[in-house]
Amino acid sequence: MFKTITLKSKLIIPMSVITVILFLLGTLLIISEYKQKSKLLELEENVKLSFIISELVHSIQIERGLSSGYSITYTGKFKRDLLIQRNITNIQIENFKKIYTIVDKKEFKRYLKKTLLSISKIKQIREKVDKQKIHSIEIIKEYSTINNSLNDILIYFIKKSNIPIVTQDLIAYGYMISLKEFTGIERALGISLLTKSIKNNNKIYKEYTSTLAIENENKKMFLKYTSNNINNYCETRNKAKSNLNLEIMRIRKIILNNQHNLKLVDTEHWFNIMSTKINNYQDIIKYIKLEIKEEIKNKLFDINIIFYFVLFLTLISLLVLVLMIIAFLGLAKEEQRLRLVMNKYVISSVTNLTGRIIEVSDAFCNISGYKRYELIGKKHNLVRHKDMPSEAFKELWNTIKSGNTWRGKVKNLKKDGSAYWVFANVEPLYDKYGKIEAYISIRLDITQSEELTEQVIEEENKSKVAQQMMQQQSRLAQMGEMLSMIAHQWRQPLSAISASAGVLYIKANRDTLDKDTAIKLANKITSFSKHLSSTIDDFRDFFKSNKNKNKTNFNNILKSVLDIVSISLEQKGISVNINIISEDEFITFENEVKQVLLNLIKNAEDALLEKKIDNKQINIEINNNNLVLSDNAGGIPLDIIEKIFDPYFSTKTKKDGTGLGLYMSKIIIKEHCNGNLEVKNNNLGAEFTITLGGNNDN
């Protein structure tokens, strides 16, 4: 039975699992790489189409500038260049129209259809230019509308990119197209302004300044998204064109300063230098095109490498699988030897359906002290310990009879009467028909662990008792200090009550006690009595054993503590300075935190009095769930500051302290309230920081 189970588990199951995993992994990787490759090919096609569109945009920009210049000057040079450029634009339009027949995506065709409708208006614009029936501003507007439609398609392509480095270059490409577009508009508007007086062209002047602003913004965005290669290329070209840029800036200054000698600047000269700048932008665009093509090419190359690498790994994995099968067949020869080893070291047994032992390992015999013949045929409760409840075994049998596995700790009885602990794993064995035919139990000896656990529990219980005793000693010490404080608090009210009673007595004896005086003195006595009662309530609440957490904050806790100690501190010349930065609520054992805070204040008071500080101060700062308490008593000596939280360690020179206050304070904050209590010296004295949890019940 065991031979069959082991051989199947070592050959059939691992082989099947590995084969399925390799197949799924290879399939997923191949599909993933194929999708990436398809997207890249689509992106490559989109980039090619965007390049065709950008050429058309460039051609329309040139035609727009020439048309605007011709509509203003009507010179022969503008007319000749315009006719040549119109033919170039027509060729670019025909190339663009071919795109419509190539693509089949409905979304993209919608963009193309809209743009083709816009392009069809070029013929009407040309006729108006030739007949001199259109103003230069209208020419700029009409051609710009067409280019905006083309730029929408370029933006569509940019959005479709899913390769970060390519997307970055496409964004830079888009901003450069836009920059070149508005540079062309500047060229056309500049011709208008250089031809006519500024006084009659305020609208054109505003459009010109707006165009310059948009140009600058596009330039900034272009430089933001450019790669290092593109940026270096642009810098090289800008250095070579520095004189050109200076000349453009000179003429811009003339235009922007509203000078009346604008006619001194030749419009053809302006057109030529701006055209040179636009051509420079076109060269940059071409450089970006080359970089984008190269990036896509490299990415496709990388994907192909990965694809073939995955294929290679799949073949290697199959080869490894074959080798594993050969290895498993070899391991089968070692199975008998391993079974002997397991029999020696693994505590196992097999019982029939009634619980009688039908097979045991040598390890089981060794730990129980029984011989094999003494166990075979016997009920398994032969090794049952009296400490194990019968309910545990009922649960065990109910679990395994239902076909499930039972796991748990079991205390067993040796032949010599001593006990041992095991962690048992009991599960059913099935025949070929799927019916339970026996139960197998594998055990792990945990005797040492359980004995150690029992010792630890015993020590923990002892520690808890000792800790409770120390906490009680600390509370008693605090109670004594509290009684002393209450005595200080009561002296003034008691004196006032005694004085009021004396006045009543004297006036009553002399028969001079009037109603108003009696009422006034009675009210005083009542008021002072309430104060005394309140002090008793504070004292009682302070040491009340309340184990329920409640929502509070450090300010409320501090007020409650100061109500008790403030008079005592004042009489000893100690001032308390409070700085509340913020008050966050938290959930904690409020009374225990009060005891800690009272202990810290009393320690500060003792230190200030012992060292005879002139200007005695206790400073308290509250910030969220942190409270920092410091004094100006000079601090704690460095050789003992690490020991002050140890039990029975006292810093008081009079040796009248229990040495439990700070130790228990640490225990309360850290273990009871899930917070932290730390100490350090600042420039003036000792500084204690209490940190509690936030707005939760940790």
Image (cartoon, rainbow, N blue to C red):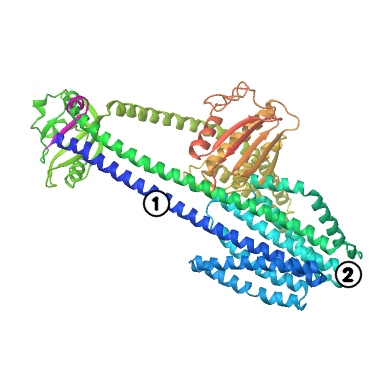
Q: Can residue 514 be seen in this view?
A: no
Amino acid of disc 2 = Ser
Magenta segment boundaries in residue numbering: 335-351
- Residue at the spot 18% in from the left edge and 35% down from the top edge: 7
In percent of width and height, residue 164 lies at 55, 50
Q: Which of 445 and 580 is in front in this view?
A: 445
Local crowd size for mark 2, using a 10 Å CA cut-off: few (<14), some (14–19), many (≥20): some
Mark 2 sits on what residue? 197
In percent of width and height, residue 118 lies at 63, 73
In percent of width and height, residue 654 lies at 62, 22
Report if residue 518 lies within the magenta region: no
Closer to the observer: label 1 or label 2? 2
Q: Under tag 1, what secondary structure?
A: helix
> Disc 1 versus disc 2: distance between alpha carbons?
67 Å
Q: Nearer the viewer, residue 481 or 127?
A: 127
Q: Is residue 78 above or below residue 419?
A: below
- Residue at the spot 82% in from the left edge and 63% down from the top edge: 268
Q: Under tag 2, what secondary structure?
A: loop
Q: Splitting the image into 4 quarters, where does residue 278 fall? A: bottom right
Mark 1 sits on what residue? 31
Q: Which of 60 and 2 is in front in this view?
A: 60
- Residue at the spot 45% in from the left edge and 43% down from the top edge: 305
